[in-house]
Image (tube, rainbow, N blue to C red):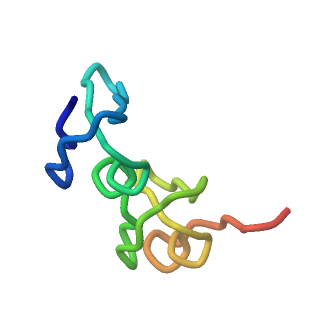
């Protein structure tokens, strides 16, 4: 069994995710998202979907990107 690095649960169905050369162990997608997903630099929400990137910064939506960096992005084309 392996121990989840987010919650500490020792779980027989734990899985590993490798990103940027580092391997992480989790017992659920919820724990993986909590640990690895970026946060919106404007409102702090966890970015689970595509989000927006402007000036090398991550945002959850076009509104937050515009409010922070004046980026002219839209959610729908």
x, y (%) of residue 53? 52, 53
* Tally of numbered discs: 0
Q: Residue at x 14, y 49 (%)?
A: 8
Question: Against 67, is 11 above or below?
Answer: above
Q: Residue furthest top?
A: 21
Report the residue that reaches farthest toward the right: 77
Rendered location of residue 2, percent (x, y):
20, 31
Between residue 65 and residue 24, name the one nearer to us: 24
Residue 50 % position (x, y): 60, 53
For this rendering, which residue is in front, 15 or 64? 15
Left or right: residue 32 compared with residue 47 = left
Is 13 or 72 nearer to us in this picture? 13
Residue 35, placed above or below residue 3: below
Image x and y of residue 3, in percent: 17, 38
Quarter holding the C terminus is: bottom right
Q: Nearer the viewer, residue 61 or 19?
A: 19
Q: Give me the residue at 32% from left, 25% from top.
A: 20
Q: Is residue 72 above or below residue 52?
A: below
21, above or below 42, in the image = above
């Amino acid at each position: 069994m392996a121990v989840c690095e987010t919650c500490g649960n020792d779980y027989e169905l734990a899985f590993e995710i490798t990103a940027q050369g580092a391997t992480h162990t989790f017992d659920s997608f919820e724990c993986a998202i909590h640990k690895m997903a970026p946060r919106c630099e404007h409102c702090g929400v966890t970015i689970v979907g595509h989000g927006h990137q402007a000036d090398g910064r991550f945002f959850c939506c076009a509104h937050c990107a515009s409010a922070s960096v004046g980026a002219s992005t839209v959610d729908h084309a």
